Image (tube, helix red, strand yellow):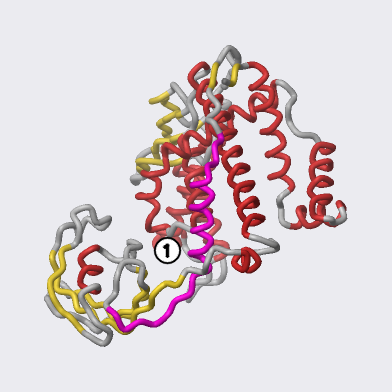
Amino acid sequence: MNIQITTKKSEGVERLLEVSVPVETVRDAEEQTARRYATQARLPGFRPGKAPASIIRKKFKDAIRQQVIETLIQEAFKEVMDREKFDVAGQPHIHDLKFDEGQPMTFELHIEVRPTIEITNTSGFTVTRPVASVTDETVNEQLDTIRDQKASWTPSESKPAPGDMVTVLLATAEDDGTIPEGKEYRLELGGGQAIAGVEELIMEMTTGETIERPVKWPDDFPDDAQKGKTKPVRVTLQDVKKKSMPALDDAFAREVGDFDSLDALRAAVKSDLVENSTRESEAQVRQQLVDKVVEANPFEIPPSWVNQMIDAYMKAYQVPEEERERFAGEFRTVAERQVRRDVIIDTLAEKHELKASEKDVDEKIAEMAAKRGADAGAVYSQLQKAGRLNEIERSLTEEKVFAWLMNQNTVE
């Protein structure tokens, strides 16, 4: 194609090109597309393929135009790639398309290219390993959490108090001031499931009572349209339940799991907390190393890579699409940090031959199988079926990369 390419941005990981397709090329594409429609179209009064070109162009004007646009953009993009030799990092985008009759077709082509990443400065850093400390108080807090999970709820006729579970019919006035029929909600008071004004109202009530009065929404309410507003609210208290925590004794330990005594449960909880604390401490060391490497070897990353990571977070957290803009704003920094981490791991693994081998993966699976008392082949098949082999390979590669980095640097 005899297209004209004008570069509007050529630095960093983004390229912005203005592409112009000559009038002659546009006209040829229109004629070819019209002829193709003419051979296939069936119009009343004409034998197949015999309808006049003018009628075909008029009848299928929009379809022909759309087909011409798609064809020319595809061919123009191929021509751009052949000429410019871009190593594309993400899906290109078309902007500002202009396609007027008798004029060249023009558009802007936004392309992200893979950055050239050279990580050469990886040693001489000093990072701090946080102390993994688990106190008796921490253990007691975790035991209380377990007790809370095992708590039972007993009906009560007393007024609700923080920590109680209530069932209410709750309705808020519409914009015209009318209050619709209430919806049933089950709330644990003090848990932040309802705004403070509604909880205060509930805690004044007795079972079976209905109260209607204005309630002010908090000034920091997430929905901007509701912030600071005062609206009539109607609440009917249907029931109240008090939480009853189990005693912290040997019987409780046996109920929780395979523990002979409370001391055994306490020891297991402490062991888990120490393990988690150690894992968190290791994660912080690794992140400090990544930050040091990024600072010493700055590089750009394509925005599309960050967006893909945001999409992955949305899927993992089951965030609805309508919440994407808010979620992306909150998690963009986290996503960018994760992308840089992945790039560093991939680059160092490739450069220093640290990528996990098939043997490494097999040995890891054999270790997992031994812990489960299962057959290694069966475990391998399960992981393969679940699509988790790449996850294991990635984890082992990370282990190798960070072990290599720690040998190059000082961990205090």
Which amino acid, by three-letter code, is at mark 1?
Ile
**Residue 168 sits above or below residue 383 on the image:** below
In the image: residue 141, left or right of residue 58: right
In which quarter of the view is residue 179 placed? bottom left
Instruction: Give the residue drawn at x 69%, y 61%.
Output: 259
Instruction: Give the residue drawn at x 47%, y 62%.
Output: 52
Q: Which SS class for mark 1?
A: helix
Residue 62 lies in the magenta stretch: no
* Total marks placed: 1
In which quarter of the view is residue 237 placed? bottom left
The quadrant of the rendering that contains the C terminus is top right
Instruction: Look at the image and tell me whether residue 136 can be seen.
Output: yes
**Residue 204 sits above or below residue 111 on the image:** below
Residue 148 lies in the magenta stretch: yes
Instruction: Give the residue drawn at x 23%, y 63%.
Output: 196
Instruction: Give the residue drawn at x 86%, y 51%.
Output: 376
**Residue 333 sits above or below residue 297 on the image:** below
Instruction: Look at the image and tell me whether residue 79 can be seen.
Output: no
Label 1: how many residues lie within 10 Å, few (<14), some (14-19) or many (20+)? few
Residue 97 percent location from the top left of the image:
37, 43
In the image: residue 266, left or right of residue 205: right
- Pick the front one: 238 or 101: 238
The residue segment tinted magenta is 132-158
Residue 370 percent location from the top left of the image:
84, 50
Residue 177 percent location from the top left of the image:
12, 76
In the image: residue 394, left or right of residue 283: right
- Pick the front one: 79 or 224: 224
Residue 339 percent location from the top left of the image:
53, 35
Give the residue at mark 1: 55
